[in-house]
Amino acid sequence: MSTTPKTLIAGNWKMYKTEAEAVELASGLAASLHGNLSADREVLLLPPFTALKAVAETILGRDKMLLGGQNFYPSSEGAFTGEIAPFMLADAGCTHALAGHSERRHVLKESDRFIAQKTAFGLQFGLHMILCIGETLDQRTHGSVENVLKGQLRLGLAEVNKDEVTPEHLSIAYEPVWAIGTGKVAQNEDIIAAHDFIRKTLVDFFPHCGSNLRILYGGSVKADNAGTILRLDNVNGVLVGGASLQVESFAAIATAA
Ligand code: 13P
């Protein structure tokens, strides 16, 4: 029987930071978290591609500090101008990657089918995949949160080999689109309800491990709300954007009691 892995505190740096700025942030975090991170937590940094290698040299080998890619193209290699393959992420030191982030769904217009291909390809390659899902404000207002979440899970996981799914290889991030970068964090009751629904859906899809897959919350997580969010039922970590860009705020989130 599988067990739930460590609570994951992930920082998605999006399209911010030069290489030098990224190294400064990563080394500041490593110093600040050294000896201060509780045994049941781990920290994942998701810098832009251009800073991956330098951040890897700064943090890898340190206890509970992990590196991930924000994106990749689901093919082993080939003529895909502007894209990056999983083996290149791995070569730079990455063990994790995102799929289905709302900015890629809504700004870059990625389809559920493409997200499904990416999730399955990354898993098969051996990356720990974090599949991001979440409703828009319009979908919430129309009462379709559960339909949207179930649909994104069903479609996003459609191509994975169920036997390959384990808590060591797959996590889900619930990021309500209206809470991302807006300062409008979801109410605790809404987070609990969404995570409970996601948990039931995962147990239904993956009876062998659905109860132990991590479900992260993302959307305006800050130092002053992280502790409360991390204590909610079925919250097994957080995916942080804006507040992951400074040492002080991200270290405070990672160590929030
Ligand atoms: P913010 O924390 O800036 O709302 O971003 C959340 C997010 O998109 C993390 O992936």
Image (cartoon, helix red, strand yellow):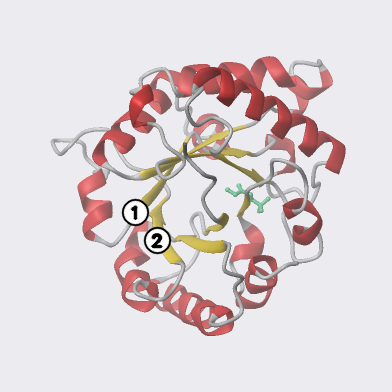
Amino acid on which disc 1 is placed: Thr
Residue 201 vs residue 88, the one in the foreground: 201
User: Circle 1: is it few (<14), some (14-19), or many (20+) Cα within 10 Å?
Assistant: some
Q: How many marks?
A: 2
- For the residues labelled 1 and 2, the Cα–Cα distance comes to 6 Å
Q: Say which element carries label 2.
A: strand
Say which quarter of the image contains residue 52. bottom left
Are the residues tagged 1 and 2 within 8 Å (C-beta)?
Answer: yes
* Quadrant that contains the C terminus: bottom right
Say above or below: 150 vs 9. Answer: above
Where residue 97 appears, x then y in whole percent? 40, 46
Side (left or right) of 12 relative to 223: left
Where residue 196 appears, x then y in whole percent? 72, 30
Where residue 246 appears, x then y in whole percent? 61, 73
User: Circle 2: is it few (<14), some (14-19), or many (20+) Cα within 10 Å?
Assistant: many
Side (left or right) of 95 relative to 80: right
**Residue identified by numbered label 2:** 67
Q: Say which element carries label 1.
A: loop
Where residue 201 appears, x then y in whole percent? 61, 21
Residue 184 vs residue 29, the one in the foreground: 29
Residue at left offset 67%, top offset 70%: 255
**Residue identified by numbered label 1:** 95
